[in-house]
Amino acid sequence: MAMTIFIIVLLLHFLLASWVLFRPSSPLRARKEYRIPVFFLLGFGPLIAITIDILDRTGRLGKRPFELETVKAEHDIFWASIAARKDDQDAVPLEEAILLNDRQTRRKAVLSTFRDEAFRYLDVLMLARNDEDADTTHYATIQITKIQREFQLKLQKFAVEHEKDPQNLALLDEYIALLETYLQSRLPEKSILRHQQEVFDRLLDERLALVPDDKMTLIRKLRNWTDIRENYPAVLQLIERLKKTWPDDELVWIESLRAFVEWKDSARIQQITNEMKSRKVQWTKWGRQQISPWVQVR
């Protein structure tokens, strides 16, 4: 008798489990992971499924909203918080890690640049490239080569696009900005540095043809000529042009002083410091900091 009752209960259980799982309107129909607990938890399995069905019908199931961005691969909701806790432990600034007398730490520091924008750590990578540890040097060289290749591809693309549309000022500005960033980095080797500086100077001339007497373009020319270290008379003429056109602009005076310092022209350094003291320039805190090694202004 007991066996008969058990078999009847078991049959009713499987019939009820099949109904709650496979009927057309069931929210669990496509959820295969629910089948085992619903079928094999005698009594409780179908009860759980019916509870989920009731919640679904009343609109209370899945009420908690979430942002789609939280399920992006790079922000995996299951391990992101754990990774964040791990990153905070034993955190060492990248610059300091490279200088530590610990090969494992140096390798780990350089490898960490593979998951970030490597250009941000270019100076550190340059330092790591000359490290005594072969693996650290290897990883740093890979990253530097990658950065170099990305810059070259972008510059080639801009060169082609600019040649097709030389009057496009917005495109020209992007090209100039990228090339300036490249020149200011430590990436260009001597064999191509001078060529790129000449290309930069030509682009600045093209911009001046489109926008004559643009202050920042002239300042960029001054910086570039100073870096090339040729044609000092032209540098002097450009400085006078800048001072005459924008006599109260602190950036003009800062860049003019910088040029004389780079050229090691002590007489003109003294001359321009005297001029700066007598001018009514509205100096910012940043501007005072830039010239503080040579002159103090109010």
Image (spheres, rainbow, N blue to C red):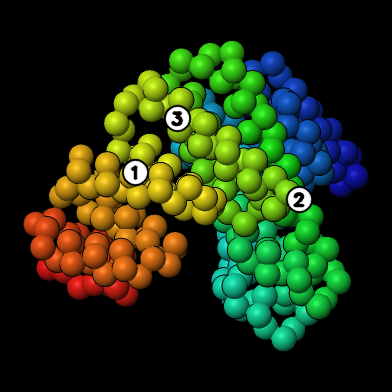
Name the residue tied to disc 2: 145
Q: Amino acid at mark 2?
A: Thr
Q: CA gap, disc 3 to disc 1?
A: 13 Å
Query: Residue at left 38%, top 21%?
Result: 210
Q: Earlier in the sequence, mark 2 or mark 3?
A: 2
User: Farthest bottom residue?
Assistant: 101
From the viewer's perspective, is 88 left or right of 283? right
Quadrant where the image shows the N terminus: top right
Of badges 1 and 2, nearer the viewer stands 1
| Secondary structure found at label 2 | helix
Q: CA gap, disc 2 to disc 3?
A: 31 Å
Label 3 crowd bin: few (<14), some (14–19), many (20+), radius 10 Å: some
From the viewer's perspective, is 85 left or right of 281? right
198 relative to 190, above or below: above
In the image, 193 versus 164, the foreground residue is 193
Where residue 133 sits, quadrant-wise, is bottom right
Q: Earlier in the sequence, mark 1 or mark 2?
A: 2
181 relative to 157, above or below: below
Name the residue tied to disc 3: 205
Q: Position of residue 270 (x, y in %)?
A: 26, 69
Name the residue tied to disc 1: 238
Of badges 3 and 1, nearer the viewer stands 1
From the viewer's perspective, is 92 left or right of 170? right
Q: Position of residue 206 (x, y in %)?
A: 46, 25
From the viewer's perspective, is 67 left or right of 281? right
Q: Position of residue 248 (x, y in %)?
A: 15, 49
In the image, 182 versus 255, the foreground residue is 255
In the image, 233 versus 270, the foreground residue is 233
